[in-house]
Image (cartoon, grey):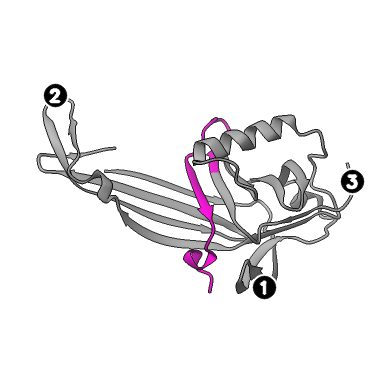
Amino acid sequence: YAMLKRNFEFVNEFEILEKSNFKETENVEYFGIKESKNDTLREQVYVLYYENEKDFAVKLYTNSSDEIIIALKNEGINFEEIYNNIDKKTKNYKGIREFGELDVLKIPNLNINLLREYQEFAGKPFKIKNGSLVEIEKALQAIHMTLNNVGGVIKTEAQARSEKSEIIFEVGEPRTFSFDTDFVIFFKESNKDIPYFAASIEDIKLFGQK
């Protein structure tokens, strides 16, 4: 059994924006920044890169060591590859990193409660510390995640049960950062290189939106 739980808040609450579409889904709740002269609010957003309105990524700072990385264009076959590509594009970006007064940020509220059983692990043998061979009977993971203009919560619990034991497994041109179609989100600690949580947002209805 293993559990991860993180609670975080933004130092300054983001604006609640008008409801709008996420792909074909209507009346989706969003938060972010409209054109703003509020320096303290804009300083919570760091532009990782901005190629165009369909290819960009930002980092959101919180009141703790937690950082939120959101990228609109997902390049890669898995989270590790996607994250490495984001990191590469960030290092190569020569544009403006500051979130400008005319820039716009739009992020959908997220709220998910998911329980998944990994049937592909059932019946798989593995060795425990004493060298004994045991077989996984059932592997479960529960995920609870929220994100809104105030902050968010992440809680994941994973459990694998075997027959013998339980184990722990500068101002430029206005830019629009609108996450209103498929995007990927990573949560990481500022002093760590690898995120502790990742999610691909494709169907907003799975995240508490109607």
Residue at mark 2 to residue at mark 3: CA–CA distance: 62 Å
Pointer 3 residue: 171
Residue at mark 2 to residue at mark 1: CA–CA distance: 56 Å
Which residue is at 46% across, 51% downward? 154
Of residues 82 and 144, the one nearer the viewer is 82
Coordinates of residue 110 in the picture (x, y in percent) = 54, 61
Disc 2 is placed on an element classified as: loop
Residue at mark 3 to residue at mark 1: CA–CA distance: 28 Å
Specify whether residue 205 is painted magenta: yes
Q: Which mark is residue 131?
A: 2
Coordinates of residue 209 in the picture (x, y in percent) = 53, 70
Of residues 36 and 69, the one nearer the viewer is 69
Local packing at callout 2 (Cα closer than 10 Å; few below 14, some 14-19, many 20+) is few
Q: Amino acid at mark 3?
A: Val
Closer mark to the observer between disc 2 and disc 3: 2
Coordinates of residue 191 in the picture (x, y in percent) = 56, 30
Look at the image and tell me whether residue 37 can be seen.
yes
Local packing at callout 1 (Cα closer than 10 Å; few below 14, some 14-19, many 20+) is few
Quadrant the N terminus occupies = top left
Q: Report the magenta residues as a range.
A: 187-210
Corner quadrant of residue 128:
top left
Which residue is at 78% across, 61% downward? 34
Which residue is at 83% across, 58% downward? 36
Pointer 1 residue: 19
Disc 3 is placed on an element classified as: loop
Going from N to C along the chain, the mark reached first, 2 or 1, is 1
Local packing at callout 3 (Cα closer than 10 Å; few below 14, some 14-19, many 20+) is few
